[in-house]
Amino acid sequence: MISKVDLAHLAQISKIDLSEEEIEKFPMQLERTIEYIDVLEELSSDDSIDLDLQEIKFDQLRDDLIKNADGERISKNLTEDGYLKGPKMK
Amino acid sequence: MSLVMIGLEIHAQVTALKSKLFCSCRGNYRDFKPNTNICATCSGLPGTLPVINRKAIEYSAMISIALGCKVPNKVMFYRKNYFYPDLPKNFQITQYNVYGFSSIGVEGIFELDDLKKIRISRIQLEEDPGRIAYVDSGMNVTNSALIDYNRAGVALIEIVTEPEFTNPKEVRLFLNKLSLTLQHLGVCDTLLEGSVRCDANVSLKGGNKVEIKNINSFKEVEKAINYEITRQSSMYNRNIKVEFETRHWDDRKKITFKARSKEEEHDYRYFPEPDIPVIVLGDGFVSNIKDLMPELPLQRFNRFVSKYKLSEHTSNILINDKKLADFFESILKIHFSPVEIANFLITDFKSLIEDDVENIDYLTNMKVKPEHIGELVKMIEENKISRITAKDILIKIFDSGKLPSEIANSTNSFKISDEKILIDAVESVFNTEKSAVEDAQTNHEAINFLLGKVMKFTKGRADPKIAMRLINTRLNKAGT
Amino acid sequence: MSNLYDLLASEVVDGIKEGLFTTEEYVCSVIKRIEDVESKLHSFISLDSEGAVSSAKLIDRKLREKEKIGPLCGIIVGIKDNISTKNIKTTCASKMLEDYIPPYDATVVRHMKENGAIIMGKLNLDEFGMGSTTEYSRYGPTHNPWNLDYVPGGSSGGCGAAVASGECTVSLGSDTGGSIRCPASFCSVVGLKPTYGKVSRYGLISYANSLEQIGPICRSVKDIVMIMNVISGKDMNDNTTIPSSSITINGKTKKLNVAILKELIDSCDGSVKKTIYSTAEKFKEIGCEYSEISIKNLNYALPSYYTLASAEASSNLSRYDNIRYGFDLPIDDYKWEQYFSTVRKNFGEEVKRRILIGSYVLSSGYYSKYYLKARRLRSLLRLELLTLFKQYDLFIGPTMPILPFKFGEKIDDPIKMYLVDINTVIANLASIPAVSLPVGFSNGLPIGLQMMAAPFEEQKLIDASYALENTINIRRRPNLT
Ligand SMILES: [Zn+2]
């Protein structure tokens, strides 16, 4: 069961402030989704099943070369001397 | 269980790479104006994808092999999810071994000395975050942080040891050996500003582990650990329990201080990075890398001892300074006289350098080249100049970059073996040092005194053997 | 000739090259069409009519000067608004990217432009591609051109509606769990989700990287082929792309072994079922055999899909902290954590739900229970399908288990909404290609046939689709007057 405490934790690690309405509504909705995906538990946890992830060969990787990016720059929140202005740290 | 247990987590930038780990911006981000060494990818713009640098895999594999690690056949990247303003994507692409070994190096063993080995748990390749250039504090409040992504995405190696150090000295020894190894591999310049960082965990008497973060140079690590051991021991003495916690090292005040507790609650939600397929290194990979690897310090030491017949002491001094060792070997190509050259380097040459130790890159910037030392040592060996003169000439080379023979000529520094000149010198000394001459008839010490005078008279250029013979001849003449 | 805006891509290219009309005339006809119908449909988030006209003029001038223009000469493309377009706002239908103007083109956009296509604008979607109706768009939903009270499908709903109604020649959408095929089915157009790795994702704003592909939505199979041959191929900016051969339209279909997926057809609406079975019969007319087969691991497909998609989404969407891009909210007075949490409130509800679920399934203790299991199911399913593909060339079934539905019908119940994706997620999980082809109507609402093939066997999908398209006679254009 997803409690409001669990929800608060999830919201905290996801960095999302929830509205009052969402705090009321979400636990039930998330719980139903989790119940729905809980059928995965029936699957064998046989570790021998290969995860079949996509592969790439070492020699196909990019060469260590420098390319100048033109115009691919940040445009928002820049200070005059080029720093990106972020919220205060403390 | 030993009294003190220390483990290390070392981050070192792979400074030999031209480009960043996942994009083609410059790996050497230093000297750029803020946010000018960035592209859409390393500044985390939506829709960009990491494209991995093959050389980064190669170099980090070299490091793994040099530190005695196994390199898995398949290498994977994971996402470490946490929010922080210096992370352009609010996650870091790194490696992770909890669901099977897939980082570039695992299970290594690194020999500290004959008695002690330290196990390396893993070596990971990951991206460096950006930098927060100015954090507001105190009275002068700026309501913002200034972020610079020039460093974001630079390839970083994380080396994690088991907590097997039992005192700070071992840590220092380890870091020295590690630096030396990295130096010899030529992949990480640990002397570059900000290129290495170190975290250390310290526990006493089997108590709770305290993590010290933010140690920004190898030099500071020993100090931080010493401080922490003292702090924890005094707590034990006062029966205060040491908490499991994270502390930061303040390198101005030289103390550790407690981090805010929130930072310890991280749940990083690792999962395989979907934008980078599993990298298959292939069968011949490790042996290919070994072929590409430069000689490691130990191998080089052994070679110096066996091939050049240097003493272990001399070899050590040379190996401990990779550039000096390289310099030594390039002199040998000009004049092959290993023992003489090595001795000259570690005595006369180094004594001139050590006045100026701050200039760490002396070997690249100085005017003294291998040809100079080669010729100079050859002149000593051929008895053309004295050792003392050689040192004077060396000083002049440092200033002018001129060849030793040229300097010796222009300053009349060659040894005097012309007997006519030397007879005149002996005659002159005999005339002024009459009482010494008399003594010398009976007292052998006085003969050396006379030789000293002759040397002084010739400004050290007299060939001592000839001068001695002439003094004896002259004494015999005087006695009869 | 009727209206220029009605033409297929191949007809546009031929018409312009043969001098039947100019590119500018064609573009103006489409702009006029947009002016007529856009207020009813709301397919676009942003329109660049001026840019389109000047691109058209440029092409006409080049043609007069005998310069070579690529194979897409003069066709008009609408781009789903989660694909980056240089200097054109790309919002993902989210407040979090309200004012974001990418400084670069997605690889597919670059390819389209280089081959003579003209960009008309950016098409509506569910926020970040999360949804099946466009109801989750921050800019309001798109309407189904066949019945304006109904949803157009999603998440590429703008693509489906715009192509079906003649607001563009073709469009590029993205498909994470059915987002190309669902609106293709609901709007009665053709949509192809390519094999994973066939088309570069560089510039596609990620929702679930390991599942999604960019693909074309068009009014004909031939148009699909034209677009695919321009956008597919290895891209140095996307490590997950794989080189592959081009596809062709050849009139003759080799005899294909076709299998109806029993589970998919059993669970769908009666009217949909009827149409699919009668379409299956058509396979005999084009010389193919069909039989019915069952897939073992299908029950777990959707739970597995939602686990993986949410997990990846929760991480992908972390970067939206409003510092480098986003809406206007001064940073002063906030501590960084407060600022992040405050701005991130502005994701839509469905996006927030998926981020929270994603954080949940990845958090320590749950990783093996959910993420790893889901990943394993994915491998099992792929293995099972690949084994079956040794015997069969194509799997067929309904693209959507139901007919298009009315606005508001499912929006309050996330699970109900997720269930409409049940047929389409299979192809994403197995990384195989799948197409949705219009095959009929029920009560005036479109029905699509889904066909899936083995990895990189797009040619088989095209062969069968082209043959069926020529066999099945259905109305091709909605009445919007
Ligand atoms: Zn970059």
Image: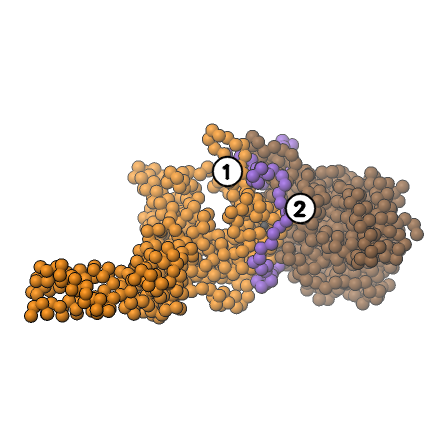
Chain colours: A purple, B orange, C brown
Would you say C154 lies left or right of B137 here?
right
| Residue under pointer 2 | C103
Mark 2 surroundings within 10 Å by alpha-carbon count, few (fewer than 14), some (14 through 19), many (20 or more)? many
Specify the farthest residue to the top.
Answer: B139
| Residue under pointer 1 | B134
* Position in image of residue C105 (x %, y %): 69, 49
Residue in front for this viewpoint, B327 or C439: B327
Assign a secondary structure to mark 2: loop
Q: Quadrant of the C terminus of chain C?
A: top right
State the CA–CA distance, disc 2 to disc 1: 27 Å
Residue found at x 61% / y 32%: C330
Residue in front for this viewpoint, C205 or B340: B340
Q: Is residue C437 visible in the rendered structure shown here?
A: no
Q: Based on the displayed image, in which of its 4 quarters is residue C226 positioned?
A: bottom right
The answer to whether C178 is drawn above or below residue B341 in the figure is above
Q: Quick check: marks 2 and 1 in contact, CB under 8 Å? A: no
Disc 2 sits on a residue from what chain? C
Would you say C261 lies left or right of B409 here?
right
* Position in image of residue B240 (x %, y %): 34, 37
